[in-house]
Structures are given as structure tokens and as C-alpha cells.
Amino acid sequence: NNYNGNSGSQTPTQLHALCRALLLHAQTVYHEHSLRRKAAQTQTAKEKEAKSDGHLRKQTTAIDELPPAHILQSCVGLGAKMLLERKIRRALTRVQKWCSSTMGGSLSIEVEWLPLPLFELASHLVISCQEADGLTVDVTIERDELTVTSFSDDGVYQKVQFHSANELEIFLKMALKRRAARK
């Protein structure tokens, strides 16, 4: 048995923390949906009292218009985002090391994560490199998809979508190398 306690790229402790976070998220989504449903039921009861004129036709109520909770989809999306975010953090560390070794330390990247709640279904970060013509890369992570918008001081604008941290890493290295070659 070659099991070393790891599953893919996650340790048992990391998987346990992820599962607990997803369970808490599922409970939160269910609770919020229950509160909306209770409010809709109260509103429907008030409407029925106000309109008790004996009409037999079915009217749509606030409960009928309430969308389903989509707990499973929400948990899957959050889990995918959390795993991808961890991989992106590792990829950004590799890009920084690559800048130091390959580019002779002439380039360095700055990464700023937008502070969002843990259970937000999207993450945002900005990567910048002033030494590379003011390259700025805005990254939005939603589920397992990255939307990357890059622009620089010289007016170059680009928007692409990726599905892995490796694709983002290659994109950043190519953009930095291209701008360093212009100098």
C-alpha cells in the first residue's frame, strides 16, 4: 500500500478543513433559504387574508416565486473555487521564483487579493509588475474558471479565460518575458 496520507494535491488536514467549510456553507445557504421561505409564507398568508373574496382561480404567491436554494451547486462552486485558489497561490509563488532566477531579479510581481468573505463564490486578485511596462493583471476566480484581464502602461489590453492555475502561470511568464524583451 503506497498511501502516504495525501489525496492529490491536498493533505488530509486540508481536505478536512475544506469539508467543514463546505458543510458550514451548505448550512448557511439552507438557513438563508429557510428565512426567505418563512418571510414568503408570512407575506402569502397576509395576502390571502386581505383577498378573501372567494375567487377560485389560482394566483401566484410569494412562495411560488421563491427560487430554489441550489445548495449542492453552491457547495460545488465554492469547493472548486477554494481548490483553484490554493493552486493559484502556489503558481504565483513559482512565477515569483521564476522572475528571480530566470529574469535575473530584474522583475518582481506584487499580488493583492481583494478581501472577501470565505464563503463568497468568487475571488479577485490583482497582479502587477511595474518593471514590465506597468503590467497589471486583474483575475476573477469563479468556480473552476479564471477570467484574466491584463493591461499595461503602453495601452496593451487583453482578456482571456482559463481553467487551471498552470494556464495562468504560463500566461504570466509569457507576458513578463515579452515585456522584459522590449527593454
Image (tube, helix red, strand yellow):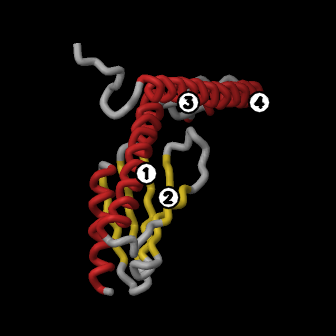
- Give percent across and percent down for residue 122: 49, 48
Q: Secondary structure at mark 2?
A: strand
**Quadrant location of residue 47?**
top right
Q: Which is more foreground, mark 2 or mark 4?
A: 2
In the picture, the quarter occupied by the N terminus is top left
The circle drawn on residue 50 is 4
Q: Circles 1 and 2: CB distance less than 8 Å?
A: yes
The alpha-carbon separation of the residues under discs 1 and 2 comes to 9 Å
Camera-side residue of 17 and 59: 17
Q: Sort mark 3 into few (<14), some (14-19) or many (20+) by Cα contacts within 10 Å.
A: many
| First reached walking from the N terminus: tag 1 or tag 2 | 2
Please tell me which of labels 3 and 1 falls first in the chain: 3
Q: Residues within 10 Å of mark 2 (few under 14, many from 20)?
A: some
- Give the amino acid type for the residue marked by disc 1 in the picture: Ile
Q: Distance from label 2 to label 4 (Cα)?
A: 51 Å
Q: Amino acid at mark 4?
A: Ala
Is the residue 55 above or below the residue 143 in the image? above
- Between 71 and 100, the one nearer to me in the picture: 100
Q: Residue at coordinates 35% horizontally, 81% vertically from top-left? A: 156
Q: Which residue is mark 1?
A: 141
Disc 1 element: strand
Quarter of the image for residue 171 reads bottom left
Task: Say which element carries label 4.
Answer: helix
In this rendering, which labeled residue sits more in front, label 3 or label 2? 2
